[in-house]
């Protein structure tokens, strides 16, 4: 049975990716971050192939503890899905002074360094896996050439996602020759999942449907694995 670790799995796309891979017969290690959500615990009652591990991707000690927790159960992972992210607006753009200078660091630590540290710590397990697939959930806001001015748009989230893309490029340069394949994904504007599992009405896409599409993209081999591309939920390629 192949296995995967998913970060930010408590709710939203991460939660539905866990469900999707369980339905496909995978063992799923789900990174749990907020304490007040129990959707994962409810899912585990139905499927013991779901393993819940505490994980804050912004904290290297937490990543190390999560790695040790997985190692107690297996020394090999087939796939890593980096989905966790800090999202939202902050008081940080030059048209809204004074800028909150802590916000960019928090976003960078979680959204850009977090996925990179996950690979650093989990690489020995992924080296032992058969598939060697590294998947990263990015966003259209990471695309520097396409970014338009929007009044009051705060900088930390887009800056962190562009940094994530650069990290993925650098890791691809190193790890593709070692047999790894990469997926970079823009999920589209999704509804947020609330504590009771319901979805907010205010967005275009249902994260369960996006997770189905993303899982297909993450699991299926591509014709040209050497080329690093970012695809969206409609299988369209984005420049980044
Ligand atoms: N939603 C969209 O429209 C959209 C569009 C483009 C790209 N994306 C990307 O898609 C991914 C999933 O989005 P989503 O809408 O499902 O978001 P979400 O509902 O906010 O889920 C993200 C999960 O990551 C968790 N998280 C936050 N900081 C973390 C940390 N330090 N360590 C571990 N987990 C952490 C969140 O916890 P909390 O609940 O405590 O925040 C939450 O459970 C993200 O990478 C996002 O950037 C989303």
Image: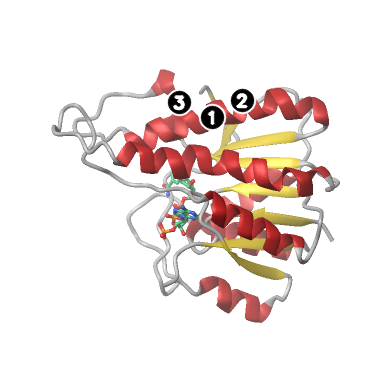
- Tell me which residue sits at (24%, 35%) in the image: 92
Location of residue 192 by image quarter: bottom left
Labels 2 & 1 near each other (Cβ < 8 A): yes
Is label 2 in a helix, a strand or a loop?
helix
Q: Tag on residue 2? A: none
Where does residue 131 sit, x and y in percent of width and height?
Answer: 82, 44
Location of residue 159 by image quarter: top left
Residue, disc 3: 143
Q: Relative to 80, is 55 on the left or the right?
A: left
Is label 1 in a helix, a strand or a loop?
helix
**First along the sequence among labels 3 and 1:** 3
- Tell me which residue sits at (48%, 59%) in the image: 12
Q: CA distance from mark 2 to mark 1?
A: 6 Å
Q: Tag on residue 169? A: 2
Labels 3 & 1 near each other (Cβ < 8 A): no
Q: Tag on residue 165? A: 1
The answer to whether residue 152 of the structure is visible from this angle is: yes
Where does residue 203 sit, x and y in percent of width and height?
Answer: 37, 51
Front of the two marks 3 and 1: 1
Name the image colouring: secondary structure
Q: Residue furthest left?
A: 97
Is label 3 in a helix, a strand or a loop?
loop
Where does residue 55 sit, x and y in percent of width and height?
Answer: 55, 59
The answer to whether residue 138 of the structure is visible from this angle is: no
- Tell me which residue sits at (76%, 57%) in the image: 3
55 and 238: which one is in front?
55
Counting every numbered tag in the picture gives 3
């Amino acid at each position: 049975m192949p296995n995967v670790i998913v970060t930010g799995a408590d709710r939203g796309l991460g939660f539905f990716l866990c469900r999707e891979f369980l339905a496909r017969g995978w063992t799923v290690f789900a990174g749990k971050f907020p304490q007040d959500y129990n959707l994962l615990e409810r899912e585990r009652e139905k499927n013991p192939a779901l393993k819940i591990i505490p994980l804050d991707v912004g904290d290297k000690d937490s990543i190390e503890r999560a790695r040790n927790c997985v190692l107690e159960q297996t020394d090999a992972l087939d796939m890593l899905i980096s989905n966790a992210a800090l999202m939202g607006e902050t008081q940080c753009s030059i048209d809204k002074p004074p800028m909150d200078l802590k916000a960019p660091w928090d976003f960078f630590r979680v959204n850009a360094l977090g996925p990179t540290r996950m690979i650093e710590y989990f690489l020995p397990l992924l080296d032992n896996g058969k598939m060697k697939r590294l998947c990263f959930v990015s966003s259209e806001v990471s695309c520097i050439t396409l970014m338009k001015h929007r009044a009051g748009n705060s900088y930390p989230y887009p800056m962190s996602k562009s940094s994530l893309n650069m990290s993925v490029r650098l890791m691809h340069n190193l790890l593709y020759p070692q047999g790894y394949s990469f997926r970079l994904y823009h999920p589209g504007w999704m509804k947020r999942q609330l504590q009771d599992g319901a979805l907010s009405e205010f967005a275009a896409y249902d994260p369960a449907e996006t997770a189905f599409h993303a899982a297909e993209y993450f699991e299926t081999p591509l014709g040209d694995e050497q080329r690093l591309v970012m695809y969206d939920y409609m299988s369209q390629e984005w420049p980044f």
